[in-house]
Each structure stands twice: as structure tokens, then as C-alpha cells.
Image: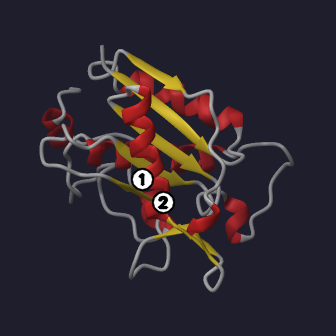
Amino acid sequence: MKRFGLLRFGNVNPFLIEYLQYSLTQEFSKIFNLVEIIEKRIEIPKEAYNKKRNQYKSAFFLTITRISALQLNYNKILGITDVDIYAPDLNFIFGQAEYSELGEDSKAGIISVARLHPEFYGIVGQKDELPVIYLKRTLKEALHEIGHTLGLNHCQNLCVMKFSNCIEDIDEKIENFCNECAEKINIK
């Protein structure tokens, strides 16, 4: 039985996690028997914080996610956080994943929803309402990082695996894998 887990770092909106669980169950039904929300919530690692940048180093989140996958016996885990993360030599990242060509050794991916919400860009909506665009962006980034753990590289097609350098890039790409990528991971 292949198990996929969703691991929360900090105070990620519970509805967002349930939305991801439902959407990822639909998308990956041919790969994973179960997509579960992991009960235990992980505290934001204090040692990951860079005071000069007011951001968190993504490597800490990725390591904790990988260890959780091994300890809890999941084939893959996606960590989700609401703090802003970065990787060396980059101003910020939306997500990051372990990658191996066949995807067998890759256990972990992470996404940050901090820069996906319209409020990050000064667009304020209804209080306590999750905008549809936020849900779509989050799903796209989740699919993208999971795609890497399954052995996919960045894609040049109109595909969820297309590289996103800014929020507009995320908004432009589709919420699905292109036919080529879907065939590579056997979900078509």
C-alpha cells in the first residue's frame, strides 16, 4: 500500500489542508492508495530563521519532512508551511523537493503558502475567506513539488511542472500535468 502524507508546519489553515487532501487524492489515485493529513503538527524550526532576511531556510523543513516520511512509514510527504522560505542564492522559493530521476528515493517536498495568498501582495478580501486563486496557487505548487518527488523535471509545456519564478508564473500555468508528464508518472 502506497501512502502519501500532508505535514503541517505551524498554523496552516485546516480548510486548505483538507482541500489539498481531496484534490491530491483525485489526482494521484493511480499512485497512492491513501492521501492522509498527518495529525501531528510540527512547530516552525526556530533554527531555520534568518533574522537578517526575515525568512526561514527551506532545508530545515525539507529535512524534517524526510525524517517524518521515514519514521511514519509514508512513501512521500508534502510539508506545508505559512512562513516565507528561501534556498541558498535565491530571494525566496514557493517550494522545494527532493529529486531522483526515478522518484524512488525522493520522499519529501515542501511548499510555503506565504507568498501564494493575495494579502501578501496587498490585496485584501473577505475576512476568514480563502480566495479561489489562493487555493489554485497552493494546489499548483503542491502538484509541482510532488511531481519532482516522482521524478519529473521542469517542463516547457503549459504544465504544472513549468518553473515559476514569480506569482504571475504560477497564475499562468495550468492545474494539471501535461500529457508527457502525466505519462511519465503513470497517472494518465
Question: In this view of the protein, can residue 94 be seen by the observer?
Answer: no
Amino acid type at image mark 1: Thr
**Front-most of 78 and 132?**
78
Tag shown at residue 60: 2
Residue at x-position 20% and y-position 54%: 153
Q: Position of residue 39 (x, y in %)?
A: 62, 27
**Front-most of 38 and 140?**
38
Residue at x-position 42% and y-position 79%: 90
Using the rendered view, name the quadrant where residue 27 is placed: top left
Q: Which residue is mark 1?
A: 63
Q: Position of residue 65 (x, y in %)?
A: 45, 45
Amino acid type at image mark 2: Phe
Tag shown at residue 108: none
Using the rendered view, name the quadrant where residue 129 is placed: top right
Q: Count numbered badges in the picture.
A: 2
Residue at x-position 26% and y-position 44%: 106
Q: Is residue 56 above or below residue 145?
A: below
Which residue lies most toward the bottom here? 52
Residue at x-position 38% and y-position 54%: 173
**Front-most of 76 and 178?**
76
Mark 2 nearby-residue class (10 Å; few <14, some 14–19, many ≥20): some
- Asked whether the residues under the numbered discs 2 and 1 touch, taking CB atoms below 8 Å apart as contact, a structural biologist would say yes
